[in-house]
Amino acid sequence: MSEVSQGAGWWLASDGKWYPPQPAATPSPPGSTQGFVPQPYHPYQGHARRVGKTRNPWGVWLLSLVTFGIYGLYWYYKVNEETREYEPAVNVQPGIAVCALIFGGFTLGIATIVSLVKTGGRISQAQRASGTTARCSGGLGLLFALLLATHLVYYQSQLNKTWDRHGNPPPGSPV
């Protein structure tokens, strides 16, 4: 266990610690369990994290304003996709998240609220996985959404901190 990766095969657990690769189990004669040590399942093992795009938070907000929200929907899809590609434990279908924003009015806004709050949680999950302090709050993101859609600025600035942890490599780069 380490605070940083020690090389190929090391995997980052949800506790924020890096663990060494598991040794291969030694095969035993058929029917024998002697000498066999079952290896635990690690969902992070073998997954190459991919960083997302560093964007200007106010540029995201301004583009959304100028395009009457169209860019904001595209951005929301990309942000959810990037967090999923970065942290394999993030469970999201970006298209469903966008649909919740668009069609949330039919459910009295509940789907929109849930989607906005969960996206903040996903960003927080990615922050923890990067080894930084999880500072993103879905509740705060919801509050900013009510204040002239400034949740775009808040969420993008929080994501930028995650990508900064890796030195801002090109989007999609494995880390």
Image (cartoon, rainbow, N blue to C red):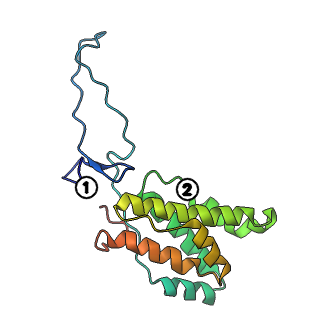
Q: For residue 141, what is the image quadrant?
A: bottom right
In this rendered view, identify the residue nearer to me: 132 or 7: 132
Count residues near mark 1 (Cα–Cα under 10 Å), then give few for <14, some for 14-19, many for 20+: few
Q: Is residue 47 left or right of residue 95?
A: left
Q: Position of residue 168 (x, y in %)?
A: 32, 74
Q: Which residue is mark 1?
A: 3
Q: Position of residue 20 (x, y in %)?
A: 23, 44
Q: Is residue 72 above or below residue 120?
A: below
Q: Residue at x 44, y 80 (%)?
A: 55
Q: Earlier in the sequence, mark 1 or mark 2?
A: 1
From the viewer's side, name the closer residue of 152 and 66: 152
Can you give x and y, in whole percent of width and height, for residue 17 in the image? 30, 51
Nearer the observer: mark 1 or 2; the answer is 1
Nearer-the-camera pick, 127 or 163: 127
- State whether residue 95 appears in this view: yes
Label 1 and label 2: CA atoms lie apart by 27 Å
Please report the residue visible at 64 percent of the width from the left and 63 percent of the height from the top: 115
Q: Give residue 140's quadrant in the image.
A: bottom right
Residue 146's label in the rendered image is: none
**Which residue is disc 2 drawn over?**
92
Specify the amino acid type for callout 2. Answer: Val
Residue in front for this viewpoint, 52 or 154: 154
- Counting from the top left corner in percent of width and height, residue 149 is at 63, 81
Q: Residue at x 21, y 34 (%)?
A: 23
